[in-house]
Amino acid sequence: MTAPVPAPTLVSRAPGVAFIFKKALISALVALVLFSLMIGVRTEAGPTGQLIYWTRFDDLAAMVATVFGGSIVVELLRQWWGPVGTVRIVPPAAQDALVVARRAIAPVLLIFTFLVPVIFYDQRYILDLGILVLTYVMLGWGLNVVVGLAGLLDLGYVAFYAVGAYSYALLSTNFGLSFWVCLPLAGILAAFWGVLLGFPVLRLRGDYLAIVTLAFGEIIRLVIINWQSLTGGPNGVSGIPRPTFFGIPLIAGDNGLAAKLGIEYSPTHRIVFLFYLILALALLTNWVTIRLRRLPIGRAWEALREDEVACRALGINTTTTKLTAFATGAMFGGFAGAFFATRQGFISPESFTFQESALVLAIVVLGGMGSQLGVALAALTMIGGFELFRGFDQYRMLVFGVAMVLLMIWRPRGLIGHRAPTVFLERSQAISSELTSEGRG
Amino acid sequence: MSQDNILSVDHLAMRFGGVVAVNDLSFTAERRKITALIGPNGAGKTTVFNCITGFYKPTSGAMRLTHDDGRNIQLERLNDFRISKQAKVARTFQNIRLFPGMTALENLMVAQHNALMRASGLTFLGLIGAPSWRAAEKHAIDQATRWLDRIGLLERADDAAGNLPYGDQRRLEIARAMCTEPALLCLDEPAAGLNARESAGLSELLLSIRGDHGTSILLIEHDMSVVMEISDHIVVMDYGVKIAEGAPKDISDNPRVIAAYLGADEEEAIAVMEGGT
């Protein structure tokens, strides 16, 4: 559009002014209706319980004006960037650089993650945040098997996280089993519950599957709350043993790891240990998933997502294929749950609400369904971004929501919008997500 | 003679509520032959296919599949994936059902799922990368490569199946069905949407599948040039019942068949036939 504007464009843009103005007016009107009660009037309970309210019409006017102006700007930008719908921001030269950057991002991210405890040794906040992000990376990778690969929409993933956490908490507090014995047990128990969930939902697809898995997540949570004699109900389980370095506790004193290594004890040791523990668990999840994708079972999962009828015609047992997907995803959720319990030292049903399931699912969808790197980036964006916006105070959720919406407009199929083939003859070329299906359960 | 039939369908009936889609249909398909099932739209051909391949459970009737070693399998007793896994019946679909987001090669690898699953020791041997699994995987890739070469898609092995032209997708679906190493291959309108040259190529492919692999083929087709060229035996259906059966030559002169296709009575049909061909 730097060249002299030809006449036809002028003609076609002439009605554009009226169009833009009209569109901005409609946007402003919608904003006025929406915000008149939300921003225009503020209500609060008075000291004696009566309703007090005051108006904020200046704020409302500012908001509507912003929407009006913003709408015009957005529409103008869209017209300048060529036909509506195509966004040409990145020049070809920069695209080559982007390809290189894309290749390098995974190794760089991995090396950086390994170095985080070294770089931020003194910053407890960063280390805790890192552990949190890695927990969600692991949960995301686990759910990715079910949702991303097998295309089974699971809204109750937190149930397996809870099963894992309670397995470790109860086994260790009641029977004194160590973390390393409980970890596989937690995985197995979660996988068992995954199969149990799998059976009734075998015939369900899409929305129906989502609702039943949602209910399943709630059932597990309600059982935990109400089975007081076993789980402690809403009070949760406390005094869960901290993890040990293969039997050597990370405590101050003669038996502790610090004393045995002959270094001075610091509470940070435990945090660093937890960091590397969850990193190892997450990498295990990643490694197993990458391996499984190249095995017949993984290909069958993806084929199931693409076309279940064709799978049956090829002699693939869709029942066991779905159940293994549920079980594998649930197992990783169980591992993450056991880690969560040992890290917190205290668990209660409040940690396993639907919000967690939704967050993990959002991570998988935002990452680009099926992409391991995408899920890791999305977990970093979601959890890290959430912390980043802490400064915005009461507008935190608003800013976060707007960021999410913008991201999905920019990348409708997730951050990593393509799938890498599991096997190739000559060259591995990425397949655009436009071709892959999301799966109908 | 009866031992040479790979498939014998006896008194097959399929009703959907009050609608009789297939009524008392009996026919046989000979081993290592191409049997075509033809008839006007809505005659019940695809329903028969869905019964044979386990997607429908027939209301009544029996379908017996006889393997090379004399083993008999009653298809109506197996369901869904077992038809392909145990009875070795493969099928393609009227509207192509490839895995569009997977490459052509991956599509053929998925088809070898059951063999690979055994080789990977139900995933566990594969997970640790056992040598026996690696050999099996290589074998599977070789087989897939051979098929890609045969259908002329070797160049596009690493392209997404959904990106292939229509005719290529049709051939890829047949190759995928063949990768399950079936005894009986059921093709639902394989020539639909193909141009004359592609149809000729398809005929050649099907003849070579029958000749080189000894696979018996059951075919639904509307393209009469393909049917007449490659079929050994033709079964004609109309309104869910069999109206004629025989060699291609006999079928093409059969007035009842022509009447069914033209929707006219027999005498008119004879007149058309004598005037037209």
Image: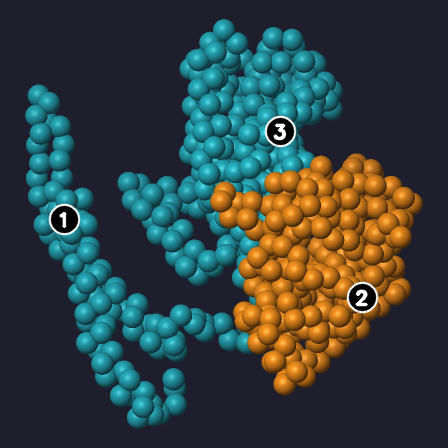
Chain colours: A cyan, B orange
Mark 2 — on which chain does it sit? B
What residue is at 29 percent from the left and 73 percent from the top? A76
x, y percentage for residue A289?
Answer: 68, 43
* Left or right, residue B185 beside residue B20: right
Q: Name the residue beneath numbered marker 1.
A: A36
Three-letter code for the amino acid on which mark 3 is drawn: Val
Could you tell me how far apart the alpha carbons at marks 1 and 2 are, in whole angstroms? 78 Å
| Label at residue A269 | none
Q: Residues within 10 Å of mark 2 (few under 14, many from 20)?
A: some
Three-letter code for the amino acid on which mark 1 is drawn: Ser
Q: Name the residue beneath numbered marker 2.
A: B232
Circle count: 3
- Using the rendered image of the protein, determine whether residue A362 is visible from the camera's viewpoint: yes
Could you tell me how far apart the alpha carbons at marks 3 and 1 are, in whole angstroms? 50 Å
Q: Name the residue beneath numbered marker 3.
A: A195
Name the quarter where the C terminus of chain B is drawn.
bottom right
> Residue B131, relative to residue A254: is it above or below?
below
* Corner quadrant of residue B247: bottom right
